[in-house]
Amino acid sequence: MTSDWADAERLLDFLGHAVIATDMDGRIVRWNAAAERLYGWTADEILGRNIGEVTVPETGQEHGDDIMQSLRDGRPWSGGFTVVRKDGSTFSALVTDVGVRTDDGRLVGIVGVSTDLGHALRPLLARSSDAVLVMSHSGTVSYASPAFARLFGWSEESLLGMRLWELVHSDDRTVVMRPPAREQRAEPPAIECRLRTPDGSWRWVEMVVSDLLDDPAVRGLICNIRDITERRNAQDRLAELNEQLEAALSSRIVIEQAKGMLAERRGISVEEAFQALRKHARDRNATLQDVATAVVTLGLSP
């Protein structure tokens, strides 16, 4: 038996992923060499301590409850998870936990395998012009790409454990937080919404959420985000200009109609009718458009 345990320990040390085993009270009973490198604790320092107290930040407690419920139901749990190192820094880990059961099916412990999600995704996303967030099924951020920090000013560490809805403008949350459709489709839909920056300002973005919860390499929702603030501002300016042009055109049409109607009623020239409209407007401190509208709609004859 001693030889078997020694062989198992050597096998764990050869694995590239961190392997951690705990009993049902959360006390750490196995901690391989990769776990030492990833979390900064040596096995001698960590064995016997509670895993929730040394590797799980406060923002990860909800995830811990989800994991335990899944394991009690006989299912392994896998997904992005924010964890903390010995030095207090946090990072995104891709974690898979499975239950250890006795022959009669009783759950007696948990074995977890974890790796740095950032190290896995950063080579793929570092050169992307799009900002990328990786989230759990509930919208909790487990990874933020370098482009997200550059575009919006948030550091990755400040985002870990934050929910996407905390960044989204309250008027846009209904659309953004709608659960992604599970049916197959060529492309997920693009969503336009406003995201908050650290200084409290808002940026318009185009967001595409891809469901990769079933992908063993990601186990999350991939949110591609593109800043479209300038485009939206240009659209708003164009819409405002169009409204002004339409208002000016409508005003001009009403004035021309009033000039023609007044000229016909009085048997005067169109220019004389225009002068009469202007004089009536000045005498009553009214706008020319208001007087013209009264002539056309109410039959006023100034």
Image (tube, rainbow, N blue to C red):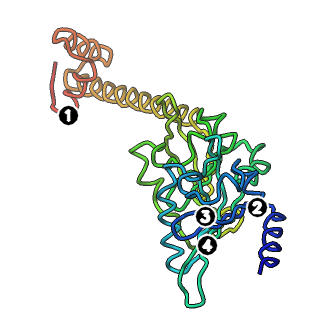
Residue 16 sits in quarter? bottom right
Q: Nearer the viewer, mark 4 or mark 3?
A: 3
**Residue named by callout 3:** 211
Please determine whether, in this image, residue 206 is positioned above or below residue 111.
above
- Residue neighbourhood size for the residue with mark 3, other residues' Cα within 10 Å, grouped as few (<14), some (14–19), many (≥20): many
Q: Nearer the viewer, residue 176 or 218?
A: 218
Q: Residue 300: x, y in percent? A: 15, 26
Give the residue number, with chain letter if any, for mark 2.
17
Q: Residue at x 64, y 66 (%)?
A: 29
Relative to the observer, which residue lies in front, 232 or 154? 154
Q: CA distance from mark 1 to mark 2?
A: 80 Å
Q: Which circle's residue, 1 or 2, is located before the other in the chain?
A: 2
Q: Nearer the viewer, mark 1 or mark 3?
A: 3
Circle number at residue 184: 4
Q: Give amino acid for label 1.
A: Thr
In terms of secondary structure, where does tag 3 sit? strand
Question: Tag on residue 297?
Answer: 1
Counting from the top left corner in percent of width and height, residue 167 is at 48, 42
First in sequence: mark 2 or mark 4? 2
Give the mark toward the camera: 1 or 2. 2
C-alpha separation, residue under disc 2 versus residue under disc 4: 33 Å
Residue 149: quarter of image: top right
Gap in angstroms between the C-alphas marked 1 and 3: 58 Å
